[in-house]
Image (spheres, rainbow, N blue to C red):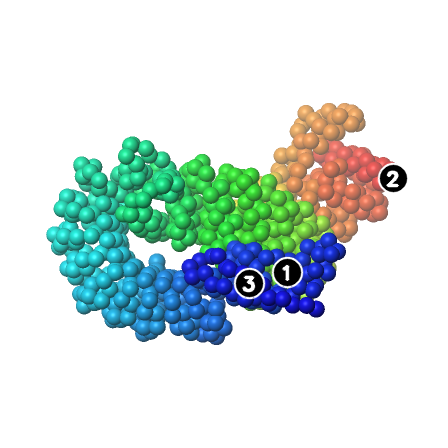
Amino acid sequence: MSRRVRRKVAKKGKGNEVVSIPEIQGEVLDLESQGIVEWRGLPDDTVIQLLSCLSYRDRASFSSSCRTWRSLGSSPCLWTSLDLRSHKFDPSTASSLASRCVHLQKLRFRGAESADAIIHLRAGNLRELSGDYCRKITDATLSVIAARHELLESLQLGPDFCERISSDAIRAIAHCCPRLNKLRLSGIRDVNADAINALANHCPKLTDIGFIDCLNVDEVALGNVSTIRFLSVAGMSSMKWGVVSHLWHKLPNLVGLDVSRTDIGPSAVLRLLSSSQSLRVLIALNCPILEEDTSFCATKYKNKLLISVSTDIFKGLASLFFDNTKSGKNVFLDWRNLKNNDKDLNEIIPWLEWMLSHTLLRSAETPQQGLDNFWIEQGGLLLLSLMQSSQEDVQERAATGLATFVVIDDENASIDCGRAEAIMREGGIRLLLGLAKSWREGLQSEAAKAIANLSVNANVAKAVAEEGGIEILASLARSTNKLVAEEAAGGLWNLSVGEEHKGAIAEAGGIKALVELIFKWSSSGDGVLERAAGALANLAADDKCSTEVALAGGVHALVMLARKCQFEGVQEQAARALANLAAHGDSNSNNAAVGREAGALEALVQLTRSPHEGVRQEAAGALWNLSFDDRNRESIAAAGGVQALVALAQSCSNASPGLQERAAGALWGLSVSEVNSIAIGQEGGVAPLIALARSEAEDVHETAAGALWNLAYNPGNALRIVEEGGVTALVDLCSTSVSKMARFMAALALSYMFDGRMDEFALAGLMSESISKIAASLDGARKMALKHIETFVHMFSNQQAFAAAAASSAPAALAQVTDGARIQEAGHLRCSGSEIGRFVTMLRNPSPILKSCAAFALLQFTIPGGRHAGHHASLMQNAGAARVLRGAAAAATAPLEAKIFARIVLRNLEYHQIEHTK
């Protein structure tokens, strides 16, 4: 294998250097002769250009491919700037990077641990340092950083508060960094005169100072910094504006001043504008005292721009750039497109962009009344304009501002639709998607966050999909950067609410990406896990997508979260996703797959005991859906599900209707098994179900009535229902519930209870005195129950239609009765052979009311088109029900309803038999 050395000049960044790089050529030539493109044969400068467009993580992976690229990956021009905010950065990582950071000039970091590690980079040529999440950074850390980087020209810490930094660190910076040009610090408690005077005396090049959201700053000392051109005291709550207005106008070089979010008044603003010879821009956004004075006007000061809520900001900004009255919504972009050699403007505009983006974000984070019109008319448009800045941190803050200012209630995912749609109309979606496609991970995450929040609005979600946003978010969800993946998953979560977007997410590979996210971040990253599970839960509510979730390994991933994750949001979404998987897709297959997954049922049973209502609700819902599978039903019981769900029902009398519905529903599902039904009764499940039957919510009526219907099949449970006052509750449901299904199942439960079997159970083994008392009590309950059963059945008896059906057996006459009697939802009920047999037997009961009720029930269960009608017809054929039905239809003493309903059931059986033989 031959080797040769080529010399290339890397032409990017400052200080171009000639680098000698060994390359492997033999394999390249062999492959080229075969017509195969070999990536290692790319010119060195092309490889360097490719590397410059990658994230740092991808750049490292790319460089590890071969010796050639590893050497190219160390080129100094690739390491003049470094953004470590999304990476774990500790002393060991810093030491491993140190050999590449000799020429490092710009560094962005996040958090106190990263700040402590900066000195290990040994980046003696560092010029710009920017950090966020700085609350825990101390004076000692900042002083050491300053001492090790004496060439530092720009230091920015924020926007969160630097609570542990004091004037001592500022003095250290002043003494150690004589070349300092820009200093912006947020949230310092006190900046005293000694610290400010140290800056004035030791930093002769200092022109840009920002003491933002600080509690106390010495105003008089600031007036001594004669070199200052740009000053921000935004967010200051204790400024003495009288002192300020009499001192700062004397600053000879002051061009831009930011007093946003302060209590400055009109008089101070006017004095600064009128007295300062150099001042060109005064930013006073979100200043309540200034805005309260509706008579205030500052337009008379020519060549000076006041930016406030009440001014035309775009027109004012345009006046800085143009000689005419041209005004547009992209003034910053217009300025960048100008061939302008105005030195002052070249400094003012970047400062303006930075300060506006900061103030708009802060104002969005702390919503105030009275700013609604500003956000609609100017604020949102300003953020869109700032998103096109050449400064990456300005673009990020603008995107974050868009994500923030639309939110009304983040807990309930509520946004201001007017603001969201205004952004959409002004082309904001396309701009955000453009940022999301950037290779810079900071821009990716903030743009994805904004897209996610805006997509809560259905119209915006549609626009995002139409602009290709689903494919972009699905791609970002595969990012190795957790923050990017988290925000992208959030975007897919919100988009997946819309039924029309679910298929597109699947086609874009979003389902696989979301499942892989769970495995990738299973041991950390609660935010990304909640969003991924939430998106999968929405997608699993679609039949086709639900199947794809299962095929992609979603069952295993979600069960893993339900078992191991302790974060309530993740638990809730994982349980909801499992509930939807069990109810959709190839439901039998998905349902069984969840039940077979090791630890799934045990985990869901355990989650019903969670202290968080949302988790309990979704876990109960999942168990309810899973209980439709016979094997799952028994496995849930074996895992302690009966005891857990009875306890849940007992504890949720004051809970939300959603939790009540699912608790009763899960017990309804388990009670399909008579063994489980008996266990529920023995565990004390009857009383809480009766209490839930008295709920005001229609959905709770249905599930509680369904559970009591199943329980009442057993004579012991039926007696418990009577003893717990359940007859009255069921009678009320039967007669007053808005839900036809609840009334129907309450009537069936009452018919079970008083068909004679409970009486035998209750009276067995009792002394004669007790028998008479109990018999009298049961007789009163029976009369009340039968009366309301009769009333219920009569509600579905159209006398004219019954008369026509009695006079003629013509199909049309019977069809008219069927249409009037049909309860659509009853077609989803599935009865066992023993339950069908009990209704058939009830047709022989001496009570005409029970005969009518039994015939009415069998009618509902066999109507063609019902989900389980064929199954019920088959059970009835096997039980010889036709003979009993013919007897009921012909009995002279049977009520008319029972006769007509029995005839219709016979016709239904004939229909199903014919269908079966086809």
Distance from label 1 to label 3 (Cα)?
A: 16 Å
| Residue 269 x %, y % | 18, 46
| SS at mark 1 in the image | helix
Q: Earlier in the sequence, mark 3 or mark 2?
A: 3
Can the viewer see residue 679 in this picture? no
Look at the picture and state if 658 lies above or below 182: above
* Badge 1: residue crowd in 10 Å (few <14, some 14–19, many ≥20): some
**In 3D space, how far apart are the residues under numbered discs 3 and 2 (Cα atoms)?**
84 Å
**Residue depicted at 30% across the width and 50% down the height:** 347
Q: Front-most of 801 and 190?
A: 190
- Type of amino acid under label 2: Thr
In the rendered view, does 252 fall on the left or right side of 438? left
Q: Is residue 679 above or below residue 741?
A: below
**SS for callout 2:** helix
The residue that mark 1 highlights is 40
Residue positioned most to the right: 917
Q: Residue at x 87, y 37 (%)?
A: 918
What residue is pinned by disc 2? 917
Q: Which residue is mark 3?
A: 7
